[in-house]
Image: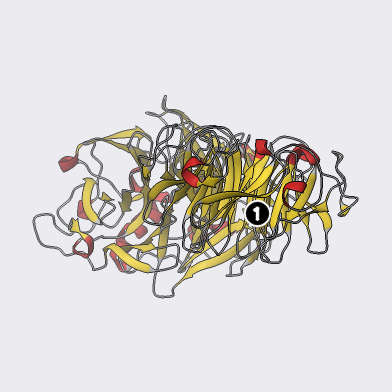
Amino acid sequence: MKNGFLVSALLGMFVIGCMESCTKPGYDTSTQKSAPFDLLASSNLLSGSSQTLLVTTPFSNDTVNVTDVVTDAAGNKYISDNRALCIRKITPSGLVSILAGGAPPVASGPNGPSIDGPGNQARFGAPLGLAIDAAGNIYVADAGLNRVRKITPDGFVSTIGGSGPTFGSGSAGFQDGSLPNSKFNQPFDVAVDASGNVYVADGGNNRIRIISGFSISTFAGDGTQGALDGPASSASFQFPTGVAVDPSGNIIVSDFGNNRIRKITQSRVVSTLAGSVKGSADGAGAAAQFNAPNHLTTDVAGNVFVADESNFRIRKITPAGIVSTFAGRGIPGFLDGSAANALFADPSGVAVDALGHVFVTDAHKVREISLSAAAGVYTIAGNGTAGLTDGTGAAALFNSPTGLVINAAGNILVADATNQKIRLMTPDGNVSTLAGSIGGFRDGTLTTARFNAPTSLAVDPAGNIYVADQINQRIRKITPAGAVSTIAGDGTRGYVEGPGAGAEFRYPTSVAADASGNVYVADVENFCIRKISPAGVVSTLAGSGAAGFADNTGAAAKFAFPQGIAMDASGNIIVADKNNHRIRKVSPAGVVTTIAGTGKPGYADGGGTTAQFSSPIAVSVDAAGNILVTDQGNQRIRKISPAGIVSTLAGNGLAGFSDGSYSQAQFNNPVGTTVDASGAVYVADKENNRIRKIQ
């Protein structure tokens, strides 16, 4: 028996009883873990990508015994530490603290060894499996006390299932009913559905139990050891240790003793999804083999990820039951690197966060499997559905996102045009609403202000955000204190210079800001680039007011629908001149030149004068001076080097959606881009209602 994940002496008596009862002819317990554990999470695994999977170790501490992990929408991780008998919290920055527990259970008091209460006053017997609901409540399978516990976001612990006055075998048993009378026998894992029902892998009772409100009942399993499929009341399991809920509401079970993954429908019919005899084979359904599958989770696509402990691998099962090896070579050890070459010593649990990052509990470590840093294009937020939902990754919804900019904190601001809102997205894909209410026009606070098709954003060194409020024909400002005001435009479509309150624009679609407090505007249907001084006075930097093409100075220059602008390090304004199919440059003095493009729509990389674009709609500039061009007509993101050489960064030229390699990725009318400090490019993929990342 391996020592990597042995339960402490507090749970030893249960483990011995379990392994004796789980033994059957031909079932070798010598390679099993004495106490298998699980973790549960639900989210979005990136799909359709050709990027390389990389295994890293973001958390390692030889003094802990990590048994499970879940993540919340803010990117915090919560782990059950079976050595210190506590639940720990790890922030995105790596700060570790104790949320609840931390001292051994006591044998006195009205509640026996199980002490509920706030923070470190609460006690656990052997915290194993975890689950988290949408409100941030954490559920704990406390196998040592044969109870299911609940921890509120502020750390208050209560018991929602199980009873028994003493620690040890006397508290174990089987009884459905109300909370005070219910009994469990080694509950190893928990899962929670969208309705708040909690499912329990009641290992020692060979059942899956459900806690609904204040009532505990048996969801599946007749209590005998076996592998019988069929109606839930007559189906049998052999020490189920993992449980999860898939997107369709099916309950997925790790049937540890049978080396199978089982499925229970909401109509309570049990079937075998994959697995048969002990082994390590990939394949379909019963042809696949597992060796002590401990714990599992599902992603939003319905894929199941399994910690196949004694095979030292993480396995993946598609909704059709096709099993493959996701990570691990099948040799015990600790080795980071590509997923195919990585080594796991004791993989006992697995979770997937909203970004598709897979977390594995591996003895005293938490391992992470994610896409490698230089792989191509992937989706960081949004799932293709138009809507308005805050959340992380695929749980977030946008409706025609068009403009992006990164603030000083490294967060991405999104002009969510059809939702009439400004959204804020953290680098790990957690999306919230910063400003905007319903469509219209109103200055005020973040929650009362109204926008009408905000299409572009800029930030200045003081942290102010500038918004091209296109249909309102205004330029708006959001201060760091959250005040929304209008700096220029009276709401009338027209062309008027002068003080901001009386100035007029005709569909301002893009903004840029310099370090001196000037704001620049792409005034599309006035065919010019406007400038707003720190005093709020509007003037024209370049353009005649009539559509055309001319490189020249000030009013002698001409544009044809200058759609997007950005500022370079020298103070030049870079312009995506859409209908001229060119990228132009405006100096601080108003001198206009052409950087790249022939003026004819097409697609060609190469030197600036020979390269071709098709309706370039937006630009951004990175720290090295490269210009990123959203070449919308070509459904590509292009790059212009400081030497003027044009190349294709990403996109295959076809409108659609596909993550993956640079050359195979697909966009659907992308608009704004922005570049972070590492050089990663973010894209507002408008018609796909997604924020994409190129790295």
Is 161 above or below relative to 491?
A: below
Name the side, left or right, on which 402 lies relative to 491: right
Whole-percent x, y for residue 524 in the image:
66, 39
Is 84 on the left-hand or right-hand side of 534? left
Looking at the picture, how far across and down is residue 569, in whole percent?
Answer: 66, 65
Q: Residues within 10 Å of mark 1 (few under 14, many from 20)?
A: many
Q: Count all numbered tags in the image, as a single digit.
A: 1
Instruction: Estimate the x, y position of residue 155 in percent, counting from the top left.
Output: 25, 57
Quarter-of-image position of residue 174: top left
Give the farthest residue toward the left: 110
Identified by mark 1, the residue type is: Ala
Choose between 40 and 395: the one closer to the eye: 395
Query: In front: 315, or 574?
Result: 574
Q: Nearer the viewer, residue 556 or 85?
A: 556
The quarter of the image holding the C terminus is: bottom right
Q: Which residue is mark 1?
A: 566
Residue 173, given in percent of the width and then of the height, sits at: 24, 46
